Amino acid sequence: MKASVVANKDFTVGKIDNRVYGAFLEHLGRAIYEGIYEPDHASADQNGMRGDVAKLVKDLNVPVVRYPGGNFVSAYNWEDGVGPREERPTRLDLAWHTSDSNAVGVHEFADWCDSVGTEMMLAVNLGSRGVDDARNFLEYVNHPGGSYWSDLRIKNGRKEPFNVKMWCLGNEMDGPWQVGHKDADEYGKLAANTARAMRMFDSELELIVCGSSNADMASLSRLGTHCARTYLRAC
């Protein structure tokens, strides 16, 4: 028996979503500090961002980049990364057993995204925090002005909102390595409530939920998976 294959490069089965080729940045190792941000580097711009790295990323034409994590986000206070750098607190990072100066935050990340031609995707902390943190962060980032958090953004030097449309609801929350680890039932309820609050602000947001971190995770029983799917219909 002989088989033959005819390849037609112009035959289209379906369109691949460009975001498949997206990436992420996390406060992990040298990804941020000495990676994209290194004020003393020869190629650093006025914001301390490495020009050589920015050029490489721009050449890759990355469509979207998620920030600030990763495991890091599960205990991250986004407020620590806004305002004057000299006033930002250094915090212990329990995810990667180090400390973080918060020299890079959402404003610096947004400027970097503009410089490399990529879209921002932000993640909210559903480990140590929850609904209030998410809605406040969203207000800070996307509201035009006239409210506490949006006015703080303006005070911090950004008059126009960032208009971020893609938001991750936590990261790998079923993993026991996460600060604020949650099983499927707990995560499903929290993610659905967070999604509901964020959609009250903007019904057109794209919200990304966590799947299982590993097919063998004990925390994702069949019952738990069913419950999570039920709760997450609101997303």
Image (tube, rainbow, N blue to C red):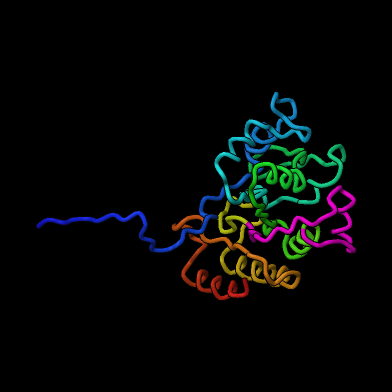
Instruction: Tell me if residue 33 comes above or below residue 183 in the rendering.
Output: above
Q: Position of residue 147 (x, y in %)?
A: 88, 63
Q: Nearer the viewer, residue 82 or 202?
A: 202
**Residue at horizontal 63 percent and vertical 65 percent from the top:** 206
Q: Position of residue 103 (x, y in %)?
A: 77, 38
> Which image quarter holds the N terminus?
bottom left
**Residue at horizontal 81 percent and vertical 62 percent from the top:** 143
Left or right: 193, with 156 as reference point: left
Magenta residues, start to end = 142-170
* Furthest residue in direction front, as rendered: 10
Instruction: Tell me if residue 128 comes above or below residue 101 in the rendering.
Output: below
Magenta-colored stretch includes residue 206: no
**Residue at horizontal 80 percent and vertical 51 percent from the top:** 79
Q: Position of residue 131 (x, y in %)?
A: 73, 65
* Furthest residue in direction left, as rendered: 1
In terms of image quadrants, where is residue 151? bottom right
In terms of image quadrants, where is residue 164? bottom right
Q: Nearer the viewer, residue 167 or 164?
A: 164
Tally the numbered discs: 0
